[in-house]
Amino acid sequence: MFNINITSDKPIYEQIIENVKELTLKNILKENDKLPSVRQMATILSVNPNTVSKAYQELERQKIIHTVRGKGTFISGQSENIDNERLRKALEDLKTICIELGHMGYDKEKIIKEIEEIYSSIEEG
């Protein structure tokens, strides 16, 4: 379910965050689904529990997950996910990427086509 590439330049905790976000986008992980505990996830992924803890803390900060003391860690509902600062940053990043692609010769239609293809690949898995 989770794809971690230990040879990637991207830190493992960021890969865990991306995996959780992608799985919720694909509706594989749904609202109120329980995630493995930090120790369980660390064992599943063969990583240090501190790495998983760091990912869970960031996911909680972003309101993607929430922890219920004594019960576990769960996927939050869509209405809880709205974080205006995170949204502003993501749109800023998208603008930067569009500018970079424009300098590489992509026009608006080609950029939109690429975004549609990326989104389709996410939906299809």
Image: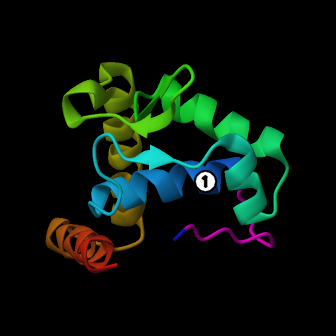
Residue 9 makes an appearance in the image:
no
Q: Is residue 43 left or right of residue 123?
A: right
The residue at 17%/65% (across/down) is 108
Residue 70: image location, x then y, percent: 57, 23
Residue 77 lies in quadrant: top left
Residue 25, above or below 83:
below
Residue 86, above or below 42:
above
Residue 38: image location, x then y, percent: 69, 42
The residue at 30%/78% (across/down) is 121
Image quarter (top left, top right, bottom left or bottom right) of the C terminus: bottom left
The residue beneath circle 1 is 16
View extreme (right): residue: 48
The residue at 60%/36% (across/down) is 56
Residue 110 lies in quadrant: bottom left
Of the pair 29 and 83, the residue shown nearer to us: 29
Residue 103: image location, x then y, percent: 40, 63
Stretch in magenta: 2-10
Q: Is residue 56 left or right of residue 28?
A: right
Residue 29: image location, x then y, percent: 35, 56
Of the pair 80 and 18, the residue shown nearer to us: 80
The residue at 64%/43% (across/down) is 37
Residue 104 makes an appearance in the image:
yes
Mostly what secondary structure, the magenta segment?
loop
Residue 100 lies in quadrant: bottom left
Give the number of marks: 1
Magenta residue check for 15: no
Residue count near mark 1 (Cα–Cα under 10 Å), binned few <14, some 14–19, many ≥20: many
View extreme (left): residue: 109
Q: What's under tag 1, amino acid-wise?
A: Ile
Q: Is residue 65 left or right of residue 42?
A: left
Of the pair 25 and 115, the residue shown nearer to us: 25
